[in-house]
Amino acid sequence: MSTATIDVHEAPAGSNVNYLNAQYGVKSWLLTTDHKRIALLYLCSITLMFFVGGFFAVLMRLHLIEPQGALVQPETYNKLFTMHGIIMVFFFLVPSIPATLGNFLVPMMIGARDLAFPRLNLLSWYIYVVGAIFTLYAVISGGVDTGWTFYTPYSSSFSHTSVIPTALGVFITGFSSILTGLNFVVTIHKMRAPGLTWFRLPLFIWAMYATSIIFILGTPVIAITLFLLGLERLLHIGIFDPAIGGDPILFQHLFWFYSHPAVYIMILPGMGVMSELITCFSRKRIFGYTFVAFSSLSIAIISFLVWGHHMFVTGQSIYAGLIFSVLSFLVAIPSAVKVFNWTATLYKGSISYDAPMLYALGFIGLFTMGGLTGLFLASLATDVHLNGTYFIVAHFHYIMVGGAVMAYLGGIHFWWPKITGRLYPDGWARFAALVIFVGFNLTFFPQFMLGYLGMPRRFAVYPAEFQVLNVMSSAGASILGIGYLIPLIYLTWSMRYGPTAGPNPWGAKGLEWTTPSPPPTENFEEIPVVTEDAYDYAHSTVKRG
Amino acid sequence: MIGIFQFGWSLLSLGAIQAPQLRPEAASSIAEGVDHLYFVLTFITLFFTVAIFSAIFFFMVKYRRRAENEIPLDTGEHLGLELTWTIIPTLICVGLFLWASSLYFENSRPPSAATEIFVVGKQWMWHIQHPEGVREINELHVPVGVPVELTMTSEDVIHDFYIPAFRVKKDVVPGRYTSLWFQATKIGAYHLFCAQYCGADHAEMLGWVYVMSPADYESWLSSGAPSQSMQQMGERVFNKLACSSCHPSDGTGRGPSLAGVYGKEVELRSGEKRLVDEAFIRQAIVDPNSIVLRNYPPIMPTFRGQINEEQVLQLIAYVKSLAAEERNANDK
């Protein structure tokens, strides 16, 4: 991509100093300002949180094998789904791609030596850890049972669980998102390599930029909301509880004003990863670059105007419902445009089926299903029946797990050789992608049917007629759980025993592949000069190696 | 459309041990319309999912990498295609929006002659009162073929009144009234769920809706009827709390007379005009200082905590009956 270091397979031999071995010791990690090391700190923390949250999900699905509940008391079940939701949303999905892959790749993809504010970047990781500690403390101190949505007045006046520590944890972690967003926006504006114009940027950068805007504009609102919740719970100031003069629906407006855009915080980075994977493994320029780039921005903007579709059955006025409904349909269109463009990118390509590509293809399928089932919920008449049922659960898991987690895993597999300098066993990785795809569908497809049959979500016990579908879902969850453990094992194994990776094992375009694997601390010996568009596979070959 | 899906599903499930149903029982006047939209949406979902998957598999096979040094040609951009796959989904979305919204519009507005029933949600049970005075817990008896409107509120947290067989659902919110209507079309017993998480026994906050023939309903009402109607219960609460000492019907009290006030517009101290409806009366009882009438002193104490939501509903029924009496008197 750059002229300066185009001969990547002849990249510096002999110099083995890279960001991983430049310094040793715990202190060198905990005080690092290297964006690549901070990305790894995030990777370890969010992986831990992912498996904690996943463990709660497995317990839930086990419990639901029997209509009267097979495992725990209802109070405990309520804590399980609450902690699962809070940990997965705020401590895994929101930071997942931006804080790990984004942190690692934003400077590398734009030809910079680090983010604009390296120390702020480290601070954001510490803030994340402090937030996570508060929330984990809440788990240990007895858990919390409000649902991840913290709806008032239940959370402010009725729940007897650790609401304050949990909310404080989420509140604190929000600042880490804001700082990361700020860092990315400044970096992308000011630190692009010479010649790297906006329309030559990889689409991953566009996605990170759109995500950062939501981080900066949305996260303060959830912080304020949780702060008000804390005020009411501690000092009994009537804000949300009608018994002391508040308005419970106000909480939902504030909460969803952040939490709907937050859905796009989770999926936009995944879409960015997709554009990188599809182009690399079909050796094609992305079809419709400007459409894909601007669809990210339009999603980010419209996402702030659709929050009311979570509230169609709260007694909200019919006319407000109409407006939120039409805007929700509107936000579906840029997503559809992206899916069509990715598919068209494959046309007349040279397609290989390496593991990251399998995750990418899985993403397209599951995201398509997730997006289309969103239309059922944007439609007012059907939303009335489906709101609050398992249909919702299935729909958002298709987006967040089928979409965001598949893209995250695809990205991790794609850039793993760059990050660690090691290759993982490709056969195992393809096998895991297949297991995850099958397990995922078996878990969540039956939940669409349960929802239409009328089973509400967050039910610790349920009428016996729903058992068959629940057992199918639980069986799927056990397969899915194993599917997630396999990569954990072989990726960990590969860090020590995997074959050494060359600078560009996939033959991919992009500045990050012009550096050795793992890259040196300063990323580029010389700042590259960019003379090509992104994904220009047609005009020069890049050998795998 | 519904028929096609059910036929397809029954073919698929041949030989299988009782395949799960595709849709819940349709037992209200709006259920078929909602199901129709649902199955069209399902068709659209399947169509696009299959189309995208087929395209991907076709490309994967046809354009698989045959040589390691293969360089595919640049297919470039295509504005026409981009516009096509922007405009077609937009048209589909606009069509769905119009259909779903007009259906919702129809489904939201109760017919004028609906039977009124009152619902109070409370952790973790449903209290239901019929105007005739019959009260039930976790059961709702309704006549078939008659529009029923529920006026609902909550004693504590947000609940949600959900009858899947009727395809109706509405949040039950503390501090305000929400309403929901349906017209049952099939005699039978149907699930009633709470669809908004409300604490420990949320999943046990359920009950049954019994749809009866009008004759059975009448005899059920009279067999279980207490000696008093809701309005009479309200009168009793009114006297017990000594409301009449400030609100005598001749208008000589420290507070306004309540006769004929329901359904009228009143002027507040701020000059704001408000319609006296259920929500207004409730607010006047639990938070009187927020709506002091012009020409009256702000001296009414709050009754929050002294009476429960069911009694508030009874008081409202009583105040409404005063309006009716007044009208009758005027007519004579």
Image (tube, rainbow, N blue to C red):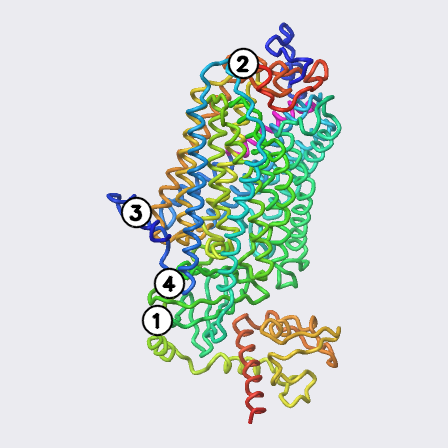
Residue that numbered label 2 is attached to: A544
Q: CA distance from mark 1 to mark 4?
A: 12 Å
Q: Residues within 10 Å of mark 1 (few under 14, many from 20)?
A: many
Which secondary structure lies at badge 1? strand
The crowding category of the residue bearing disc 2, from other C-alpha atoms within 10 Å (few below 14, some 14 to 19, many at least 20), is some
Residue A318: x and y in percent read 57, 61
Q: Tell me which numbered mark, 3 or 4, is placed earlier along the sequence.
A: 3
Q: In what element is the residue under mark 4?
A: loop
Residue A27: quarter of image: top right
The answer to which of marks 3 and 1 sits earlier in the sequence is: 3
Q: Looking at numbered disc 4 in the image, what kind of residue is underneath it?
A: Ala
Residue type at the position of mark 2: Arg
Tag 3 secondary structure: loop
Q: Are marks 3 and 2 in contact (CB under 8 Å)?
A: no
- Quadrant assignment for the C terminus of chain A: top right
Cα–Cα span, label 4 and label 2:
63 Å
Q: Nearer the viewer, residue A314 or B160?
A: A314
Range drawn in magenta = A29-51
- Label drawn at residue B212: 1
Instruction: Name the residue tied to disc 3.
Output: B19
Distance Cα–Cα, label 3 vs label 2: 50 Å
Q: CA distance from mark 3 to mark 1?
A: 30 Å
In front of the other: label 3 or label 2?
Answer: 2
Was residue A38 drawn as part of the magenta stretch in this picture? yes
Where residue A138 sits in the image (x, y, percent)? 57, 42
- Residue B27 circle label: 4
Pointer 3 local density, CA inside 10 Å: few below 14, some 14–19, many at least 20: some
Instruction: Give, as a three-letter code, the residue at label 1.
Output: Met
Mark pair 3, 4: CA separation: 22 Å
Quarter of the figure that contains the N terminus of chain A = top right
Instruction: Say if labels 3 and 1 share a chain.
Output: yes
